[in-house]
Image (tube, grey):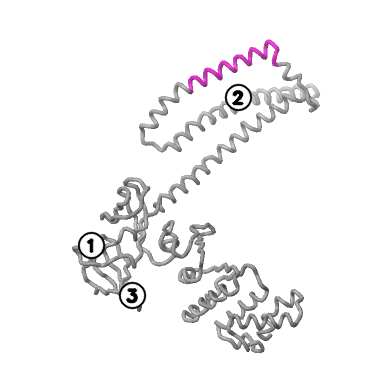
Amino acid sequence: MTIAENIAFGLKIKGKSQNYINDKIRYALKLVNLEGFENRTPASLSGGQQQRIAIARAIVNEPKVLLLDEPLGALDLKLRQDMQYELIRLKNELGITFIYVTHDQEEALTMSDTIVVMNQGYIQQVGTPEDIYNEPKNAFVADFIGDSNILSATMVHDRLVNILGANFPCVDEGFGQKKPVDAVIRPEDIDLVKPEDGIIRGVVTHVIFKGVHYEMEVMANNYEWLVHSTDMFPVGAEVGLRVDPFDIQIMKNQNLKMRRRQELKSRKLLSGPYLFWAASFIIIPLLMILYYGLTDKNGNFTLMNLAQITTQENLKALGLALLLSFVSTLICLILAYPLAMILSEKNVNQTSFIVLIFILPMWMNFLLRTLAWQNLLEKTVSSIWFCAFSIFRSLR
């Protein structure tokens, strides 16, 4: 199959004329800078040229949205960078939407107008490349997009955060006082100065030359800081670390979020047995009472059963039931207020304790009814066996 036949595959399926197909092939090859390659085979092309042919095959069909799933993953670094510029040019010339799936952070920042960061199927943040990089919403986004120093910190008060025992001025507000937070500082935002001029002091432990900058690791306050700087400090040099307040990004503590999610899952698990109990011994029995109360022996609708409530015997039983309900409710209210005061003052696991308070009486109620049924059934079964034995003796 030639390159022309490869590009024309979709158009032939649509039943387009040969003249239309030829015009589209020439147009697509011109867009990807491969004019004159029509009669060559894909196997004779380089990796980058093959990727261009795949894109040409897609754009000849004039899609409104073009999905590109890791299109440059198999290419070397230089070719990948060249193809990034080619794709940007194509997007601008064609005027169609590109949905570009990639795990390469540099590609995402270079090629996108809008970035959607996802983790395990959930959207973490949506924004421009600048917003995603400079204002990450959580630690995952900060770590995924570019290098970061992500530190557990304490918000002393508005515009002041304590990181590794040192107070850093910042510009964030609304996190409360002495609240655990996450602080994100990009390596290029850390200034290495004289030890006495820094907020904290450290020692350079590693230095790597990256071409446009030096990548250094600085051990300070028992944490290894990643620093990018055009100035090189040798290994073993004592330095001071200083960060501009606008370059410190404060976020809600990720560990706290995880604990809250686990608590919600635990609550859902605890509610499962209660819902089963409620359905089995409250909802279903009430529905059965409603059914038998409004039907006769043959299953036909009737109100005669309700009329029986007005008899003296039933009214007496109803009055006694209401009296017992009122008394038990009053006792519960009298006990509830002191118990609430005790719970508020004692440092106990309130969730599990309150669940126990509610569930235990229900279990006791169920156990009492079970024992009552057991006694009734024991007498009934004994009577049945006695009758059966008597009949058997009479037959003999």
Decide: is 101 above or below 375: below
Q: Is residue 234 magenta?
A: no
Q: Which mark is residue 30?
A: none
x, y (%) of residue 47? 55, 82
In terms of secondary structure, where does tag 1 sit?
A: loop
Q: In the rendered image, which quarter is residue 28 located in?
A: bottom right
Residue range highlighted in magenta? 309-332
Mark 3 or mark 1, which is nearer the start of the sequence? 1
Q: Is residue 340 left or right of residue 271?
A: left
x, y (%) of residue 102? 52, 69
Residue holding disc 3: 213
Q: Give the spatial CA distance, label 1 vs label 3.
A: 21 Å
Residue holding disc 1: 198
Residue holding disc 2: 372
Circle 2: is it few (<14), some (14-19), or many (20+) Cα within 10 Å? few
Instruction: Determine the residue located farthest toward the top in the rendered image.
Output: 312
Q: Quick one: quadrant of the N terminus? A: bottom right
Mark 3 or mark 2, which is nearer the start of the sequence? 3
Circle 3: is it few (<14), some (14-19), or many (20+) Cα within 10 Å? some
Q: Give the spatial CA distance, label 1 vs label 2.
A: 78 Å
Q: Give the spatial CA distance, label 2 vs label 3.
A: 83 Å
Decide: is 167 above or below 321: below
